[in-house]
Image (spheres, grey):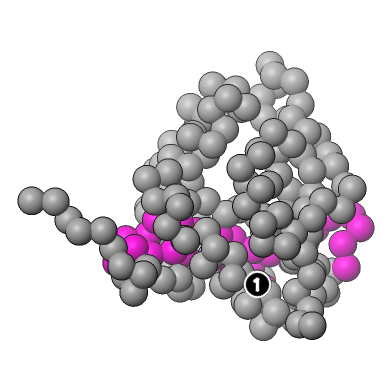
Amino acid sequence: MSTPPASTADRSVRVAWTADADAIGAVQARAWSASYAEVLPAAALAELDPRAVASRWAEALRRPPSARHRVIVALERNDVVGFAAVAPSDDPDADLVADAELVVLAVHPDHTGAGHGSRLLAAVADTCRSDGFTRLTAWLLGQDDAQRRFLESAGWAPDGAHREMVADDAAPPLRQVRLHTSLEEE
């Protein structure tokens, strides 16, 4: 017997609990393996062990670096199917009080297209506003067209900043671009 599709009422977001770490690790490992298979070196993707990722998330949830570091999960029924993490931006040009960074936004590939990413993004914006941030940034791989289209459709835009990231010593550096959005209510 198959399970009927979840209704919109069965989909929600909430602040992450330490007990969510295993699910967050599994979502991140699966989402990144699917999203970055063509971009990141195989060795880097092989290191995405869900248990190791979950262990790091458990520690971050137990002892966040500050009260302004947040993790929000997307739920389908009671299952974590996505998450987002935000923190004060540590970019050299950031305003330490006003700028937050969307560190990660991931939805399990089996649950994309159901609005989880949009709900997470809205919850992140509301949370950051409540924490006094007025601008939100995100670093994306230059080749991550899907994430870029998603953020741009929500009103984000490139701000001209870019950097290179080394994922594996044997591979060339990966170019990242920064997008931003204002959190100020108009």
The single residue placed furthest to the front in the displayed view is: 153
Instruction: Tell me residue 97's x, y (percent).
Output: 83, 74
Q: Residue at x 75, y 74 (%)?
A: 183
The single residue placed furthest to the left in the displayed view is: 1
Instruction: Say which quadrant the C terminus sits in.
Output: bottom right
Comparing 7 with 132, the one in front is: 7
On screen, residue 6 versus residue 144, left or right, reads: left
Q: Residue at x 70, y 79 (%)?
A: 129
Comparing 50 with 63, the one in front is: 50
Vertical comparison of 47 with 170: above or below: below
Instruction: Tell me residue 160's x, y (percent).
Output: 89, 48
The amino acid pointed to by label 1 is Ala
Instruction: Tell me residue 80's x, y (percent).
Output: 37, 59
Vertical comparison of 142 with 100: above or below: above
Mark 1 secondary-structure assignment: helix
Give residue 20's quadrant in the image: bottom left
Number of numbered labels in the structure image: 1
Q: Residue at x 41, y 71 (%)?
A: 12
Give the residues drawn in magenta, as a range: 68-95
Crowd class of label 1 (few under 14; some 14 to 19; many from 20; radius 10 Å): many
Q: Residue at x 61, y 27 (%)?
A: 40
Query: Is residue 25 something one can see in this rendering?
Result: no
The single residue placed furthest to the top in the displayed view is: 170
In the rendered image, residue 128 lying in the magenta stretch gets the answer: no
